[in-house]
């Protein structure tokens, strides 16, 4: 019995499911990719968070890459406000800093998804 | 059972934050990411310094390579020779002349590489600067290989070419390469006058690039061959038919001697 204090049971169970699939002798690359897609698809933000921390802590390269990729994919073409809202992040920038950042990259804020505010 | 603590994304360990950021290929996504909160802003601040390469020189008869002093302490981006002088571009954009015998380094004393909407040194990992000699002129080619949101999701390549004005000591953007074609690649770049001699188009840039596979499993490197037209700003792939090895071997540009 090895206690892992930083990971809750549910996340660990998910990690084990992933590892079992990826160490199956007769699973083809194709099957593994399909599994990854379904496994990560629809993962809620909170679950992704736990999975990223767990994969990093346990040093599971494949899962870590997949989860980080999934997080990044979710942010594609989204505005800063959308990311803050979805990930429940409070920006601690002062209003002057906000204005400065917006001014520097105003051009990068155009053409964003319509559901991204 | 204790209540679940709410996931605090702004408090993620830095290596996770930086890892996620490396999967954002569009420059707007990268910048938006870095504007979300202070800890995520660290990816912008930690803008990658490529392993700033150093410069060394050797001649037949030397017993070993001689290192050129890194006066700017930011490494060298590229080096070329024009009219018997060796020029090098330092990591932060200053241009230097290197004396071939003493290997003394002198700053040309001009302003840094030109300001461009996405060009600020050090370079992002999708940007590249190359020095090229062209019929006695010193040219600099800027390459930007990121995908831009407002265009399609397909990766696009932007090129800007500059010539160095030695009297004004500054870089001037070229709107046309005239009767030249530039060939850029990994470690081999050249400008060819009257490229139609070789069935190549003038006012174009032929490029050999490396594209790192970002998705898992990472590390696969693909060769990217294409030609960019300065006239219409469009890049097209260069096809050599089947059989060309696309992994682990990188073609070089060579000029025939005829």
Image (spheres, coloured by chain):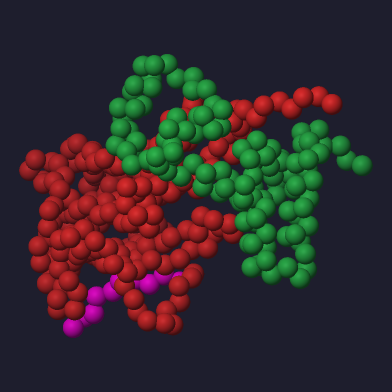
Residue occupying image coordinates x 10% and y 66%: B179
Q: Main secondary structure of the magenta part?
A: loop
| Residue A113 left/right relative to B12 | left
- Going by the image, does B101 lie left or right of B216? left
Q: Position of residue B121 (x, y in %)?
A: 33, 39
Judge whether B169 appears above or below B159 on screen. Answer: above
In the rendered structure, the colour chosen for chain B is red
Q: Tell which residue pokes out farthest to the front in this image.
A: A115
Near-viewer residue (A104 or B90): A104
Q: Which residues are magenta?
A: B249-258
Observer able to see residue B138: yes
Q: Locate the N terminus of chain B by quadrant.
A: top right
Can you tell which quarter of the image residue A81 is in?
top left
- Rendering coords of residue B109 (x, y %): 19, 37
Q: Which residue occupies the foreground of this view, B249 or A66?
A: A66
Residue at the (67%, 27%) spot, across then down: B6
In the displayed structure, would residue B134 be above or below residue A102? Answer: below
Is residue B186 in the magenta section? no
């Amino acid at each position: 019995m090895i206690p892992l204090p930083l990971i809750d049971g549910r996340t660990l169970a998910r990690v084990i499911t992933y590892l079992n699939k990826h160490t199956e002798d007769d699973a083809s690359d194709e099957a593994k990719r399909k599994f990854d897609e379904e496994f990560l698809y629809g993962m809620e933000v909170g679950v992704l968070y736990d999975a990223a921390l767990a994969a990093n802590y346990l040093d599971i390269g494949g899962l870590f890459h997949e989860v980080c990729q999934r997080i990044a994919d979710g942010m594609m073409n989204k505005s800063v406000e959308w990311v803050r809202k979805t990930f429940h992040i409070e920006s601690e920038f002062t209003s002057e800093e906000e204005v400065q950042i917006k001014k520097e990259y105003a051009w990068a804020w155009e053409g964003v998804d319509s559901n991204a505010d | 059972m204790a209540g679940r603590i709410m996931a605090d994304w702004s408090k993620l360990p830095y290596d996770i934050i930086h890892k996620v950021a490396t999967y954002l290929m569009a420059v707007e996504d990268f910048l938006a990411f870095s504007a979300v909160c202070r800890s995520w802003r660290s990816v912008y601040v930690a803008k990658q310094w490529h392993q700033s390469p150093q410069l060394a020189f050797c001649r037949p008869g030397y017993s070993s390579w001689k290192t050129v002093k890194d006066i700017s302490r930011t490494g060298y981006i590229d080096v070329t020779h024009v009219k018997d002088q060796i020029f090098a571009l330092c990591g932060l954009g200053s241009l230097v002349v290197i004396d071939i015998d003493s290997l003394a380094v002198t700053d040309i004393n001009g302003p840094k590489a030109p300001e461009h909407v996405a060009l600020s040194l050090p370079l992002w990992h999708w940007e590249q600067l190359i020095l090229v000699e062209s019929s006695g002129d010193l040219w600099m080619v800027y390459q930007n290989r990121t995908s831009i949101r407002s265009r399609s999701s397909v990766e696009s390549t932007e090129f800007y070419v500059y010539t160095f004005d030695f009297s004004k000591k500054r870089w001037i953007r070229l709107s046309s390469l005239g009767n030249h074609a530039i060939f850029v690649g990994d470690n081999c770049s050249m400008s060819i006058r009257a490229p139609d001699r070789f069935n190549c188009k003038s006012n174009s840039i032929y490029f050999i690039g490396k594209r790192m596979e970002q998705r898992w499993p990472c590390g696969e490197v693909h060769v990217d061959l294409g030609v960019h037209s300065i006239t219409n700003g469009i890049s097209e792939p260069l096809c050599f038919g089947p059989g060309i090895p696309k992994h682990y071997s990188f073609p070089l540009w060579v000029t025939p001697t005829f």
